[in-house]
Image (cartoon, rainbow, N blue to C red):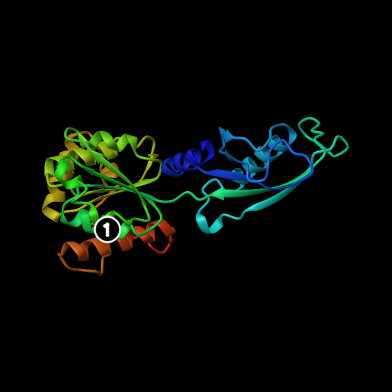
């Protein structure tokens, strides 16, 4: 089904859209009840009948997207439309004289959070288990094939989240540029050199203070961060750019070094970021 593939594509890419469903038909109509189409700001998929009917639905759907460009699930308010397919009915985009009346349901598609975990070691796996229970898009990246095997990730089999596995033996930092707009990146690989390359790649996505990444987090000690700051400065990053990396990560008042404890702390901090709580503006600490 073209419309179903479109819904999934928009979700994965974090692009707002509207699902349009022909809910009822009285008399004659180009399509039967149940026909669906998907509308984004730039594209449409499938059809609910063409002509004035479809043009009006597309126009209204795009107006809904303009009203709420960053629509979250709790803001998604569906709308109903009724149209008469008569040559005597008012029209905006040409006469459509099938003779029937139709009802349309326009449902904004929620833009869910996106998180990328680089490094599926002890902490990464525990964090993935927690995040997988939430409605989001979860990208798991590792240069070691075993860490992304079905056996290693079996705890995610019943995930609510959409799971995307990226096994990149060489240059995992290339995945950074492929992530959806607004992704939260967490760097916690087994190799500090890999971590440094990922931090460098993440900072290079910023242009004039804008980036397709929502946040960058790095796990590690203060000694590790001191070395990374110097290395990133040598790579040409300014102090202001380097400050975009949050380290340590997690909630400042939740201590402990067990992987599960760190994962809970980081997940809780991410949930605060998802909610956009203005009170949570301080740099997290772990």
Q: Is residue 248 visible?
A: no
Q: Which residue is pictured at 53% across the width and 59% down the height?
A: 74
Q: Residue at x 42, y 40 (%)?
A: 13
Outermost residue on the right side: it is 88
103 or 182, which is in the foreground? Answer: 103
Q: Is residue 73 left or right of residue 234?
A: right
Position of 51 with respect to 111 (left or right) is right
Task: Determine crowd level at label 1: few under 14, some 14-19, many 20+ residues with C-alpha closer than 10 A.
Answer: many
User: In the rendered image, is residue 187 in sight?
Assistant: yes
Quarter of the image where one finds residue 221: bottom left
Instruction: Tally the numbered discs.
Output: 1
What is the secondary structure assignment of the residue under circle 1?
helix
Residue 140 x, y percent position in the rendering: 26, 46
x and y percentages locating residue 33 in the rendered image: 67, 45
From the viewer's perspective, tell me whether residue 171 is left or right of residue 269: left
Q: In the image, residue 156 lies at what x, y percent?
A: 28, 55
- Figure check: 229 above or below 273: above
Residue drawn at the location 62% of the way across and 53% of the way down: 78
Q: Position of residue 38 (x, y in %)?
A: 57, 40
User: Which residue position holds label 1?
Assistant: 129
Tell me if residue 224 comes above or below residue 268 in the rendering: above
- For image coordinates 62% across by 44% down, the residue present is 20
Q: Which quarter of the figure is the C terminus placed in?
A: bottom left
Q: Quadrant of residue 36?
A: top right
């Amino acid at each position: 089904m073209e419309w179903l593939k479109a819904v999934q594509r928009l979700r994965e890419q974090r692009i707002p859209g509207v699902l349009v469903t022909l809910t009822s038909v009285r008399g004659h109509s180009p399509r039967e009840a149940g026909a669906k189409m998907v509308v984004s700001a730039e594209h449409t998929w499938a059809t609910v009948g063409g002509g004035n009917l479809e043009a009006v639905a597309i126009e209204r759907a795009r107006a809904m997207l303009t009203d709420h460009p960053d629509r979250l699930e709790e803001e998604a308010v569906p709308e109903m439309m009724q149209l008469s397919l008569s040559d005597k009915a008012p029209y905006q985009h040409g006469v459509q004289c099938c003779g029937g009346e139709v009802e349309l349901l326009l449902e904004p598609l929620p833009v869910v959070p996106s998180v990328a975990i680089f490094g599926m070691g002890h902490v990464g796996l525990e964090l993935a288990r927690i995040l997988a229970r939430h409605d989001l898009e979860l990208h798991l990246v590792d240069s070691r094939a075993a860490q992304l095997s079905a056996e290693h990730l079996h705890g995610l089999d019943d995930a609510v989240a959409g799971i995307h596995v990226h096994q990149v033996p060489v240059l995992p930092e290339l995945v950074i540029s492929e992530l959806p707009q607004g992704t939260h990146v967490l760097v916690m690989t087994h190799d500090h050199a890999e971590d440094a390359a990922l931090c460098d790649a993440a900072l290079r996505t910023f242009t004039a203070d804008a980036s397709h990444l929502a946040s960058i987090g790095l796990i590690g000690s203060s000694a590790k961060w001191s070395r990374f700051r110097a290395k990133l400065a040598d790579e040409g990053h300014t102090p202001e750019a380097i400050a975009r990396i949050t380290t340590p990560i997690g909630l400042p008042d939740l201590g402990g070094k067990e992987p599960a404890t760190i994962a809970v702390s980081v997940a809780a901090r991410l949930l605060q970021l998802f909610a956009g709580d203005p009170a949570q503006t301080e740099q997290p600490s772990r």
